[in-house]
Amino acid sequence: MSMPSEFESPARCPSPKNFPADDQLPKAFAEYYLAYARPLSIASDPFHLMAMLSCVSAVIGPRCYVRYGHLCIYPSISSLLLGVSTLTGKSETLNIAKQLCLDQIENAMRREFDAHQKAYENAMAAWKKLPKDTKSETAEPEPPERSYLRCPEDFTNAALAQVLETQDPGSHGCVVLLDEFSALLIGRTGQFNIGLTQLLTKIHSCESIFMKRAGGGDTYIEIPFLNIAGCSTPEWLLENMQQSDLTGGWLVRYLIYEQKEKPNRAPPSMRPYPNKGLAEKWQALIGEIHTSTSIKGEWRLSDEALATYDKAYHEVWNNILLPEEDKGDSMAGRALNMIFRVALVFEILNTRGNPKREGSVGDKYPVIQQDSMKQAIRVVFFYLRGMIAMRKTTLTGGNAALQEKLVQRLRKGEMSKTEVYKFCTNHKRGIRSADIQEIYTSLEEQKIITVFDINTPKKKPLGMVRLWEAADDDLT
């Protein structure tokens, strides 16, 4: 079994600047989706891939999963596209994904519901005309339930549960497209959204949820499936995000990518529908995935795919990919699961979109082949390294306001390290001890504060912090 060359040496480990080439992605995605989307938008390929994964995995839904230890990993993939307004094409990316992956399925679902609704209205009219004696012996027709592939953007906890409750686990999942992700961050503080972050975290893992209705009654959803594909500018995200969103268990479950520069892409084509035939081929592929009865149940890894994953994990993950301070971090641990989610989507696209490729047929279970696993590892490593860099920048920027508050407090007099810790935790919920240490380091390097020890009657010296300008000469 041969490994992809970039996994064999630290020198060839993927970097954030090296997005996988077209021949390292699912054939149908490169030849249909990207070939259609590139002339229409200035957005970069990483944006298009993230939006596609969130939408296509929602079409697949909780019909299939990969067993990982005691966990059942469903292909739920949420994504967050970051970049400056106008110049990075974030909203265009979501619109193209909606057009290529969701519109035709939603239209078909709407027509099906309308037909059921009309049949219900006819049956109800006929039932009302029955004689009183006959009507009491005949069951009243039940109205059809509308199933949603795309969730409304403005939702409350209760409305979200109501949408997920109508899902058929054997059909599809649900996705919400947010042109401004920060609106979700702001809205979760509302009266009807208390606990929304925790709810979304459970839903992303497809864990069963049990909720009490405000008007009475219970809501139980065994396998909730909701993807979020959102856009934001880094500034808006930083302003409205809590530090625990990145250091805790919510946003670390997302694929996150920040486009820092204007993509090197020609202006969008002025033709209404360039390469329309490619879009139709992709839509036919997604329609087949939506209606397929063979995409269901447990999927497993081929021996070659499992060996590829093991080698990438042991030789690259622990030793090369993550900087020393991030080893064992929750972002790395969640990315382990993300590899399986992406590999499952890629396997379905590879099998359905390439007739010449060997299918996903195993002795008992359908299997993920080695090429899909290689593609998934490349993609997740690309996003993960960028996510780690973005998180470090975001957390540092997020501490700027706190640093200023701390400096203002120190102008009133020196503080012990214990007092500084309490001050920081009181002013920024969810801040870690490591982040407080980063504040010390940053302010010391700028010669704004000095950290020193003083002797106390106790054996252990007391750590103190004071402004540099107030320090004695022997301390500076």
Image (tube, rainbow, N blue to C red):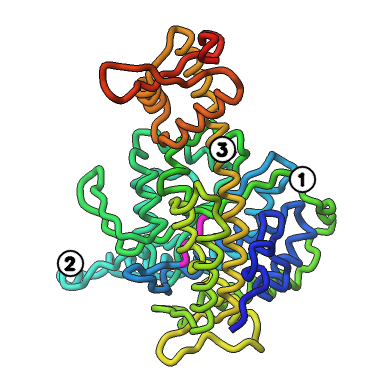
- Between marks 3 and 1 in the image, the one whose residue lies nearer the viewer: 3
Which numbered disc covers residue 50? Answer: none
Residues at marks 2 and 1, CA–CA distance in whole angstroms: 71 Å
In what element is the residue under mark 2? helix
The residue beneath circle 2 is: 132
Which segment is the magenta one?
75-79
Percent coordinates x, y for residue 391 in the rendering: 55, 43
Mark 1 closeness class: few <14, some 14–19, many ≥20 residues within 10 Å: some
Instruction: Give the alpha-carbon distance from disc 3 to disc 1, as whole Å.
Output: 20 Å
Q: Amino acid at mark 1?
A: Lys
Q: Which is more N-terminal, label 1 or label 2? A: 2
Callout 2 amino acid: Lys
Front in this rendered view, residue 403 or 138: 403
Quadrant where the image shows the C terminus: top right
Crowdedness near tag 2: few (<14), some (14–19) or many (≥20) residues, C-alpha within 10 Å: few
Identify which residue is drawn at 53% across, 36% down.
395
Assign the magenta stretch its main secondary structure: loop
In magenta stretch: residue 424 = no
Q: Amino acid at mark 3?
A: Thr
Give the mark nearest the N terminus, 3 or 1.
Answer: 1
Q: Residue at x 16, y 72 (%)?
A: 137
Residue 129 position, x and y percent, is 28, 67
Could you tell me residue 302's position as x and y percent? Answer: 49, 83
> Which residue is tagged 1?
262
